[in-house]
């Protein structure tokens, strides 16, 4: 079982446990909600926690007095809603500093390849990073893994960040079952020379009173293994469980496991570890109300809340550990010293006279080398807990100064491996089909101003392995794509799709990220809309070597090749007709060399296409898609170019029912002439394709053929037109 499969399996098991806790607490949550509505967070929580919170906030007021009017976070609570509430930029300077010690956990890449992100973690003490047990369950799993900090959006663009290798020989402890926690050592110096110390830390604070039911709970995370995101809205704490958990509405995604859950002052109150699925009779339910089964996409599950392990319980687990190696004992002791409440004793000071040694939750780790008094509060862990303890080598090398800032990103990373050498891609080959030259499409003069331009002012042609495309900058989607396809069995891989890596999308660095519609803007919140490939991975994943096939497969996962497509259209399991056109035509026309050239794209109708705003700006999305398939046939003993154009239309049903209630049976598919496709799309096809179009000179009753079955496709021009 590979890493992603293991994490997915563990995640589902933990989610089931969280869902059972959720069900058991249904009456308590209802009572929480009633009391919250009547009297606010102080009334909703227990009298003991409310008193502890009041006392602690009184101390905070005294400590924060000199900062008044300065670097204080926004404490506003927001309404819970259905959207994906991530922000690319920190809401305050305090949030930005709190985000510095939060890292994306990645597989350390080989030279020339891109790392894969599969979790989140954060520095809880010098040289120590915390994440979930299900992310790093053993020392072996931490080998060849790095913590990638500062991979984030900045005013200057998306930053690659700085990576530090994990060091499980220095320190490694883990607890499965209830706590789902791992703490692992981190090397003090990055391979590029930066110092870990300058990132700061987010210490666990063992004392209670940091947050109450009804308060916002913020999560800094790397959802989907991508750039850092801040979830600070629609984020209410719903329940606090005495056995050591918090449950809340804050949004997360796969890749967020191991994120710090923080209160409104950016103090860590928990370790995010699981989403909570809806259960019925012990079975996980899908959004459609059916039983979810292993192997189905996790996105199909109806997730209803999220859960963290409470920081106070984690501190008490750590306080009970008995380690044999002196170096590990020293590191653990430093972590526990930092768990003392930094506000302890503040009321004894004069207002405004904050001790300069008082640590903040996001200071440089150098500030934590003092030893504040330990908190003596004890909370016992209930339930089975398994603890693993690693060994320690010699002390780590001396740290070097941190460089001024992260380097600008040069290669984006996701879970599948990409070829980082964009300049080496050849793109679409006009001479790919035997005996015929088919140039790339162009764009009608009236639409040219919408295109993203190259240095010469003409539309920029982006080249990938086996295909090319051009971007409509106004609509932030591709205008057209052109791909060479070879169906020869010997050029296909025997590996299953999952062996290439987890399907995940990345930006193309050659065009601004503002020109590429991404997950959080549309695809994720529009629950019935898939990230649809225009160039299908099945068509593009071929080559003379496994590496060529892998890179060709990965290239189809650029946002430039993505369009919003309804799930029933995009997933062949729902119907499959569109995806079967290519193979059907190959059989019918006897293509020379098993080859075809396919041109495709969305119909970008600026007048009639609807638009929707899920919180990050209006997105106008297409309702129709077109495809032109060209191949050289040798049926009948002579060679000829055979060209077919198709249009897929879901306009009427979306306008009537919206994105949530589409019935795929009411979609319409047509075979259309290339001339008509040009009228609809603004894409001009080369004359060699127009001349060979099966519907070029078709009579009016044949010019638009509705396709109900594969047998309805007209593969050649009518015989009366053939010379």
Image (cartoon, grey):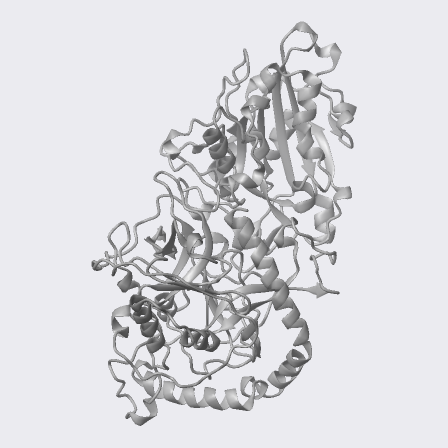
Residue 313 versus residue 548: which sits nearer the camera? 313
The picture places residue 68, in percent across and down from the top left corner, at 33, 82
- 569 lies left or right of 348: right
Question: Quarter of the image holding residue 532?
Answer: top right
* Residue shown at the point (26%, 88%) measured from the top left: 353
Residue 136 lies, with reference to residue 378, above or below; the image says above
Which quarter of the image is occupied by the C terminus?
A: top right
Residue 718 versus residue 418: which sits nearer the camera? 418
The picture places residue 97, in percent across and down from the top left corner, at 34, 67
Question: Quarter of the image holding residue 13?
Answer: bottom right
Residue 422 versus residue 648: which sits nearer the camera? 422
- 497 lies left or right of 118: right
The picture places residue 190, in percent across and down from the top left corner, at 28, 53
The picture places residue 242, in percent across and down from the top left corner, at 56, 80
Q: How many marks?
A: 0
Q: Looking at this view, name the residue that lies furthest to the front.
A: 324
Query: Is residue 50 visible from the viewing direction of this image?
Result: yes
Query: Is residue 613 visible from the viewing direction of this image?
Result: no
């Amino acid at each position: 079982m590979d890493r992603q499969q293991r994490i997915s399996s563990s995640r589902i098991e933990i989610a089931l446990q969280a869902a059972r806790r959720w069900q058991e607490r249904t009456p308590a949550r209802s009572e929480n909600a009633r009391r919250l509505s009547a009297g606010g967070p102080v009334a909703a929580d227990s009298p003991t926690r409310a008193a502890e919170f009041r006392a602690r906030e009184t101390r905070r007021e005294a400590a924060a007095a000199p900062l008044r009017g300065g670097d204080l976070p926004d404490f506003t609570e927001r309404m819970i809603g259905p959207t994906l509430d991530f922000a690319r930029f920190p809401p305050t300077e305090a949030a930005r500093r709190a985000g510095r010690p939060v890292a994306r956990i990645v597989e350390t890449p080989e030279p020339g390849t891109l790392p894969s992100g599969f979790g989140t973690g954060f520095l809880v003490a010098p040289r120590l990073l915390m994440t979930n047990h299900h992310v790093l369950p053993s020392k072996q799993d931490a080998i060849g893994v790095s913590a990638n900090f500062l991979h984030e959006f900045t005013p200057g663009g998306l930053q690659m960040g700085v990576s530090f290798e994990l060091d499980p020989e220095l320190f490694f402890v883990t607890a499965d079952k209830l706590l789902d926690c791992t703490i692992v050592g981190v090397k003090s110096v990055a391979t590029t020379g930066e110092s870990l110390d300058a990132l700061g830390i987010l210490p666990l604070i063992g004392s209670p009173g940091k947050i109450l039911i009804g308060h916002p709970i913020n999560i800094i995370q790397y959802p989907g293994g991508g750039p850092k995101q801040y979830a600070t809205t629609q984020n209410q704490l719903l329940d606090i469980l005495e056995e050591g958990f918090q449950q809340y509405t804050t949004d997360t995604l796969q890749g967020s496991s191991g994120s710090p859950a923080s209160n409104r002052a950016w103090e860590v109150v928990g370790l995010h570890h699981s989403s909570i699925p809806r259960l019925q009779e012990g079975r996980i339910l899908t959004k459609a109300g059916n039983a979810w089964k292993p192997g189905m996409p996790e996105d199909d599950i109806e997730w209803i809340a999220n859960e963290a392990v409470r920081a106070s319980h984690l501190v008490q687990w750590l306080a009970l550990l008995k380690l044999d190696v002196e170096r590990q004992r020293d590191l653990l002791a430093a972590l526990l010293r930092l768990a003392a409440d930094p506000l302890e004793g503040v009321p004894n000071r004069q207002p405004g006279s904050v001790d300069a040694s008082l640590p903040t939750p996001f200071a440089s780790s150098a500030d934590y080398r003092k030893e504040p008094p330990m908190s003596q509060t004890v909370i016992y862990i209930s339930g089975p807990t398994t603890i693993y303890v690693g060994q320690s080598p010699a002390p780590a090398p001396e740290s070097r100064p941190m460089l001024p800032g992260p380097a600008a990103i040069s290669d984006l990373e996701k879970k599948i491996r990409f070829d980082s050498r964009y300049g080496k891609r050849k793109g679409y080959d006009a001479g790919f089909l035997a005996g015929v030259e088919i140039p790339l499409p162009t764009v009608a003069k009236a639409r040219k101003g919408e295109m993203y331009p190259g240095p010469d002012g003409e539309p920029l042609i982006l080249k990938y392995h086996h295909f090319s495309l051009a971007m409509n900058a106004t609509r932030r989607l591709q205008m057209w794509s052109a791909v060479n396809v070879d169906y020869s069995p010997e050029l296909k891989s025997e590996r299953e799709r999952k062996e290439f890596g987890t399907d995940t999308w990345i930006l193309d660095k050659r065009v601004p990220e503002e020109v590429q519609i991404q997950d959080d803007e549309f695809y994720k919140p529009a629950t019935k809309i898939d990230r649809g490939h225009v160039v299908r991975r099945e068509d593009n994943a071929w080559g003379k070597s496994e590496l060529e096939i892998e890179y060709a497969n990965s290239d189809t996962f650029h946002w430039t090749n993505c369009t919003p497509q309804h799930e029933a259209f995009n997933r062949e399991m729902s119907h499959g007709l569109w995806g079967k056109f290519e193979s059907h035509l190959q059989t019918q026309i006897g293509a020379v060399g098993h080859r075809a050239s396919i041109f495709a794209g969305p119909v970008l109708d600026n007048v009639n296409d609807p638009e929707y705003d899920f919180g990050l700006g209006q997105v106008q999305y297409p309702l129709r898609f077109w495809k032109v398939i060209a191949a050289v046939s040798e049926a009948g003993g002579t060679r000829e170019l055979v060209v077919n154009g198709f249009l897929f239309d879901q306009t009427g049903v979306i306008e009537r029912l919206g994105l949530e209630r589409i019935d795929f049976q009411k979609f319409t598919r047509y075979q259309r002439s290339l001339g008509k496709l040009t009228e609809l799309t603004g894409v001009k096809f080369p004359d060699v394709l127009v001349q060979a179009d099966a519907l070029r000179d078709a009579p009016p009753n044949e010019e638009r053929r509705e396709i109900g079955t594969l047998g309805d496709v007209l593969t050649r021009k009518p015989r009366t037109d053939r010379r």
